[in-house]
Image (cartoon, rainbow, N blue to C red):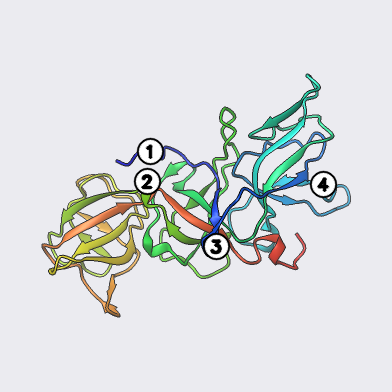
Amino acid sequence: MPYPQIPAPYGLKPINLIGGQVFAGSTRELPIQYGYNANIFYGDFVKVARYATGSTPGGFIVRAAVSTGTTNNQVTGIFLGCSFTNPVTKQRQFSQNWPAGTLAGDAVAIVCDDPDTVFKAVVCSSGTTVASGAKGMVGNNLSLIDNSAGNLISGDSANAILAPTATPVSTILPVRCVGVVPDTSYSYSAVATAASSTTTINAVAPAALPIGTGIAYVASNGQIIETGMFLTAAAAAGAATQTMNQQPVILGANADIPSGATIIYTVYPEILVKVNLFVHGYYSSTAV
């Protein structure tokens, strides 16, 4: 297993900007309304609320419950903490998270709102169950898991990227995968007991394999062939077969993984994502 291990999701963390530009920590301070009654955690999506009669006053930051990519799920950025005058101590306080219902009239959220930011996030199969990303997901749109109950001890978000259970779709979803994180990845190997048939891998699983596990195999010339495929269902250790999202395509044609080939299963608990066009509010003219 890698070090450090990834035990749970933590929301979205800024890494750099698209094109390899450095993320220099630039953020914007945006107001939180007095007594706003919802927890906001470090790594949560937030948005500037639009004025609506009898609802939230416009201009204040609120938590954005984003999972899919509808027009009502626009975001302003990622919450990276806040500051406010503590109503009990009367001292200025900096906090990793916004405690719901805090009676502070000068509260501001620290928001990473640059639409070009690339974020690191954990992939989960559901809730906070860590799964895997794969090289085959790069370039595809992915959904989020909105785990509103973050960690009140650390102040971190529990939001995650949803591991796809089929070939990723091309419709508008909140984020696009732009890379995997090799630092926390780990791999297993097994020998193919028979040639793969369409989506079925014939090999004894060397360990428990989560949804999203990437698939590669060693060619006869010793080169590693990345199939671009991944598991669409978790496989228990010792399982005789596993299921991929589709049959591998090698050199432009469908291809089986040969019998006797060494299969490499790689788990990427973390991937890199960017917020999609029309989901980020700065790039959309549609009302929030």
Marks 4 and 2 sit apart, C-alpha to C-alpha, by: 41 Å
- Seen as rendered, the residue at the extreme right is 53
Residue 4, quarter of the rendered image: top left
Task: Mark 3: give few (<14), some (14-19) or many (20+) Cα within 10 Å.
Answer: some
For marks 3 and 4, give the CA distance: 33 Å
Q: Say which element carries label 2.
A: helix
Per the image, the residue denoted by label 2 is: 184
Name the residue that disc number 4 marks. Answer: 56
Of 31 and 137, nearer the camera is 31
Residue 185 screen position, x and y as percent:
34, 48
Estimate the spatial distance between the alpha carbons at disc 2 and disc 3, rounded to whole Å: 21 Å
Which image quarter: residue 260? Answer: bottom left
Q: Provide the residue designation for mark 1.
A: 4
Q: Nearer the viewer, mark 1 or mark 3?
A: 3
Which dot marks residue 18? 3
In the rendered image, the vertical position of residue 97 relative to residue 135, given as above or below: above
Q: Nearer the viewer, residue 64 or 28?
A: 28
Element at label 1: loop
Q: Which of the image's four quarters has the N terminus? A: top left
Residue at the image point whose x is 15% and y is 65% from the top = 222
